[in-house]
Image: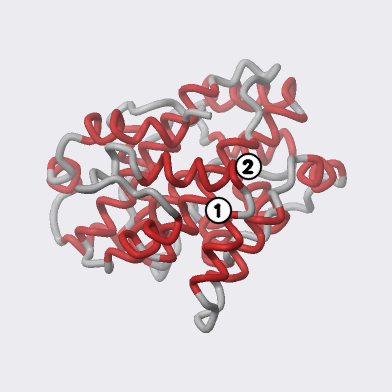
Amino acid sequence: MGEIRKDIPAMVEEMPAFPQSVHRVIQLTSDINSDPRDLVDAIQHDPILMMRILKLVNSSYFGLAQKISSINHAIVYIGVNTVKNLALSAVVIGVMPSTNAAGFDMDGFLRHSLSTAIIARILARKAGVQERDVFDFFLSGLLHDFGKIVFAHFLPHEFKKALAMAREEGIHLYEAEQIVFTADHTQIGSLLGEKWRLPLPLVACLREHHGHDQESSLIMAAVSAANQIGKELKLGYSGENIIEKLPRTISDLFDTAEGAIIDSLGDVSAEMEKAMIFIKN
């Protein structure tokens, strides 16, 4: 990849910053020796964040048997890591611009992001990932394409050109982005992740989800596969028109044909309906 245009990192810096409370949540959950009480305190000092987390954890997507009434209660029921990911999910969706001059369909984009998140989480469970870690896959899927938002918001006319080029010339959108911007959404997404001080594995997933490295991590392979499956099932629209084969890491793991993997996912549309709360501000 060529050198990134000098104006693009500056545009990333103009994206809204995370609240200090979220940075504190990331810091605490990255330290295995931190006291969960400090995490509860950090969230409770941000009433808006606290309400968003409780709204998500009490949604039909989790389907818990009883109502969760406090952050401490949430940590006991769903764990520290999932609470962290819920905080990040809520805040990222909240800071995303809702409109753009590129004509980029934000509703379709968010639905694609959500479908990728849901399918990545299902694949993680099928691969035997421990329940406390499966929401890492969901969050990585939810955020995987968010570099496109920087293009759509700050360089809308050029992004519109890239979208048209990908469609008319039958190339990947990230290839068209490279032609138009000398950078693509994976690079921009990782810069955005660094600005937000997201966990390093998540930043790596933002940067590498279009990679074809057969030694990629399970989370990267699952997000890449979920990205392709969501497009095949026509769940939302990301601006990308090409559907690739599933990563070899995924096909080797399940040792079955691609169609059988998709059939084994169950009713993804029903899961989408339950999870719509994640993309509603």
Mark 1 or 2, nearer chain start: 2
Q: At x 78% / y 49%, what residue is drawn? A: 4
* Residue 74 located left or right of residue 129: right
In this rendering, the answer to whether 126 lies above or below 28 is above
Mark count? 2
Residue 185 sits in quarter: top right
Rendered residue at 50%/81% (across/down) = 32
Q: Is residue 31 above or below residue 29?
A: below
- Amino acid type of the residue that numbered disc 1 sits on in the rendered structure: Leu
Q: Are marks 1 and 2 in contact (CB under 8 Å)?
A: yes
Give the camera-side residue of 188 and 41: 41
Q: Residues within 10 Å of mark 2 (few under 14, many from 20)?
A: many
- Above or below 55: residue 64: below
Within 10 Å of the Cα at label 1, are there few (<14), some (14-19), or many (20+) other Cα atoms? many
Please give left or right for residue 274 compared with residue 13 in the image.
Answer: left
Residue at point 33%, 43% (across, down): 118
The quadrant of the picture occupied by the N terminus is bottom right
Q: Which residue is mark 2?
A: 147
Q: Amino acid at mark 2?
A: Gly
Of 162 and 75, nearer the camera is 75
Element under disc 1: helix
User: What is the x, y in percent for residue 151?
Assistant: 70, 33
Mark carried by residue 206: 1
Instruction: List x then y, in percent, for residue 171.
Output: 52, 33
